Amino acid sequence: MSRSPRTRASASRRDVLGWGLALGAAALVDPRLPFAVAKDEKKPKADEEVLPGKGRAKRLVLLYMAGGATQFETWAPKKKGSPNMGEAEPINTSVEGIEVGSYFPNVAKTMDDIAIVRSVTTREGNHDRGRYLMHTGYIPNPTVQHPGVGSYVASEIGDTNSVLPNFVSIGGSQGAGFLGVEWDPFVVQNPAAPVENLQPPPNIDKRRRDTRLSLLDRLNREFESDRGDDAVAPHRNMFDRAKKLMDTSKNRAFDVTEEPESILKLYGESTFGKGCIVARRLLEQGVKVVEVVLGGWDTHNNEHAAVKALSEALDPGMSGLLKDLRDRGLLDETLVMWFSEFGRTPRVGEGGNGPGGRGHYPQAFSVAFAGGGVRGGRVIGATDPDGVACTERPVAVQELHASICHATGIDQDRIRFAGRRPVRIVDQFEGTRFSPVRELFV
Amino acid sequence: MARRSPPSWIAALAFSVAVLAVASVAAGGRGPVAAAAGPKDAKAAAAKVDELVVGRIKAVKDLVVAPPADDAEYLRRVTMDLQGTIPTYEETVAFLQDTAPDKRAVLVDRLLASPRHADWFAMWYGNLLVGSSIRNRNVDRRAFNDWLREQFRKNRPYDEMVYDLVTASGNSEQNGALGLMTSFETSAADAAGKTSRYFLGVQIQCAQCHDHPYDKRIKQTDFQSYAAFFFTTTYRRNMSPNNPEVSFDVNSYALEPVKGRGGNEMMAMGRGRGIPLMLEPVRRPADLRGRAQPPMPDAKFLLGKTVKDVPGLDRRTVLAKWMTSKSNEWFAEAFANRMWAYFMGRGVVHPVDDFSTSNKPSNPELLKFLGDELARGDFDVNHLIRTIVSTDAYQRSSKMPRGLERPDPSLWAVAAVKPLSVEQSFDALFRATGAEAEVARRLAMAERADGAARRQLVDPRMAIYQLFRRSFDDDEGAEEETFTGTIPRGLLMMNGDQINAMMSMRSPDSPLKKILAESRSDRERVRRLYLTVLSRDPSAGELNNALTHVHTSRTETEGYEDLLWALCNTTEFMSNH
């Protein structure tokens, strides 16, 4: 069932194959670009240019569910009593006709802000490969490390002079790959604890630290002048950037204890909830991308109990974040994406899984968006009554990435180089250029 | 002033090593080790290499070549390259005082013969093949490192070593050589992409989805028919409720013609023997259980001929024989290029793993000579190393005369400035701060530990680096071109408890204690500290700088601790140059 006003029943990849060929401008500019790639260059249709919401999002929040999160108990519940629903039930949301899983009472109330894509489909059923694909939009390849979405978005819209990192990950993420360490996430393991090594040890006061750094600067001088700047600059920048982060009062954004009780309550008392609070605090200080990770979704056994427990963190955390961003007037310019590496099998307790458990299922699963120009209160795509296959509007990973690019105003066709290899921000897989999921924005 | 005792990095270390403690394992490997070939003339080979290098330098107008490296520069560089750490203070002083004319050659022989060399090369090569993450649960890094260490210790010929890696079968606990095969799990695409990349220097992975974009010779079908060498290999993860320890079985099957179905099929495949390596990412085990298999696709050597399956001979063996044969130029040249790039900072083909028609060697005669020399010497790895480190090119200074631009790195007119790996950084830091004594005690303890925690699949030495690795960026497979430096690394070096404990005068093995006790003058103390950390004497200017710092410090202790900290964080210390 789709509530999108312009859902195409079974849109085919052929829709995008018909685009005219045009010699990419990049080919004329960069001599490294081989002709073989240039002649296949496909440009977007004119109507993509007028798709609403382009560049509306100034910031990005990624809510990543590590382990492969179920779609049935969350975004795509089946009929009550369906054997594929396990112990969960569908519940109504603030938007008439849209149901979510019964573990989402608070998320259900913010449905007006959320667009669910129920028909994401990939072929990667392995955790590492799925995580890589969902984060980078590329199939893993041993010879290229593609940047994750957090890194490539930060590199496109970030501020290189920022004292705070442009991309913060709470719980770890895909790195910047060939974009280089500058765009790697600054990883915080525990949002409830102080940032690791941000505070100097008790015997190194500020004066002593600065003595050390200025001594270091003097000791470096001879070596560096004899060896050229290219080789040594990143090493020196490392201390500059670390010192800036120590000294800026903006680093208080990492400190969740400054929040009032009401906010802590709104987001829930979980680590994930605190991560969402830190995410909002960082965005307010100019950080461009924050990823918050919630692990534990690999529910091969007793999914009911596991998802219930996870939802006790997720439901208030995510709904609290959306509400708080809306209250502060930030939601419209903040794109929020909820995703995992794949979904779970329709049948419960079968195929080598324990009692009440589900296996890995990349064929048909859900991703949710909110804010940043995305039209909420709608569902895109559908699966059959058993949740086995996508019956409407199958969505490829590349379309999700194209959508993120659209919302954040990034040119998805821009080419960066991994060594000598030209790599687009969004892959043109097997000659197909993927466009944004227009139902998210129209 | 608050000081922590005992230094907390030691506590952290003790914990991690205790958790990951493992018993020693017999190295796997198979087949007798060929006796090292007779003495080869590294000096003559080095002279020929220099002739080829200088040939191209002379072709560039007005190019200024860097002066020869002095003894201190050479000692530090070659020790870092061959042992992954800095020389000790005693080694440095002895080498600088040595007046023997052949002392550099003697030094290289001593370094190559030391256990540290095998340790370091095992770590370096292992990281190259399967990545540096200890979280790679599919590889028994302990067994793999043990196996690699043994290969480098014995100076096993490179062709035999690769033959073992590519053909390895059996159980991962018994056969350390399985480290590479187990890293592929069931992906024939990984097996094809990585073996061709590491051992042939060709990135055929590019042809997985389409014809190779830069090498018109390589078609998509070539990738598939190369990957077909791995289709007759099976992979199985062994884990049972009674035995939570994990091991892996990798086996190969010979193909037999099957009556009535046409084509070859893999007999005995399926039930209970593991999952065959495949190209398709999504596996459907149901198809593998007893049902008819589609005909096995033919295997074909890269840009070579199609292989006729012989009953009784499995395809990986056929591949390994072709791959490591002396007539396969790719094989020798890929390794010669990798070693040249490792020591010289830039491959003759650059990037190292990217031999293709559109990425030509910068000096084809040099590449050919290095490859031929390796093959002629029966793939004697140490002969190749001796040849390279004996060249004038390797023995140049990394300093350029002031005001001159650094020439094109593929001319090797000046020595490269190379970033250190995580392992090199910390082994150097452990040595400079005396902490390696404690590391060695912990490692010895881990060696003695019982097998209870054996199958954590982690080498205890790697567990130590893991404490720090989180603060570093070290993407597996990424070729480091410049110094990497993340904010967490900067924060760790400035504020980390472990780091500050190592810099403290109270650290049990701190060199500062000895230096302050034994040396009377600050001048002598600064000099000793320079020799300990940077393996060289300070210049007059540096000496004055350091003395001013010491004399203006709040206390003597603080002054020397800060000097130690600063020296250990210089770009000079954190690079090989």
Image (cartoon, coloured by chain):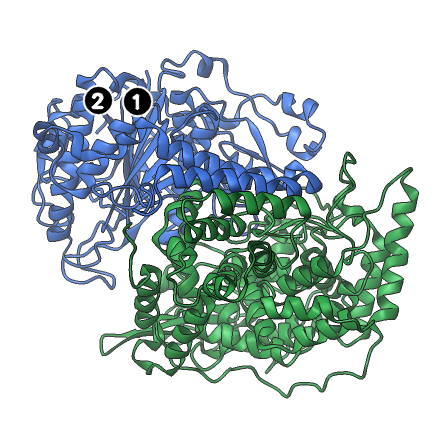
Chain colours: A blue, B green
SS type, badge 2:
helix
Percent coordinates x, y for residue A168 in the rendering? 35, 36
Q: Give the farthest residue toward the front.
A: B520
Please name whichever residue, B57 or B511, is drawn nearer the observer in this view of the structure: B511
Whether residues under marks 1 and 2 lie with C-beta atoms below 8 angstroms apart, the answer is yes
Q: Callout 2, which amino acid?
A: Leu
**Above or below, A98 relative to B346:** above
**Above or below, B436 relative to B22:** above
Q: Which residue is rendered at x = 22% and y = 42% of the image?
A: A71
Q: Which residue is rendered at x = 24% and y = 64% of the image?
A: A352
> Is residue B481 shown to the viewer in this render?
no
In which quarter of the view is residue A376 placed? Answer: top left
As drawn, the label of residue A334 is 1
Percent coordinates x, y for residue B395 in the rendering? 78, 58
As drawn, the label of residue A325 is 2
**Above or below, B437 relative to A165:** below
Percent coordinates x, y for residue B367 in the rendering? 80, 58
Q: Which residue is rendered at x = 40% and y = 17% of the image?
A: A55
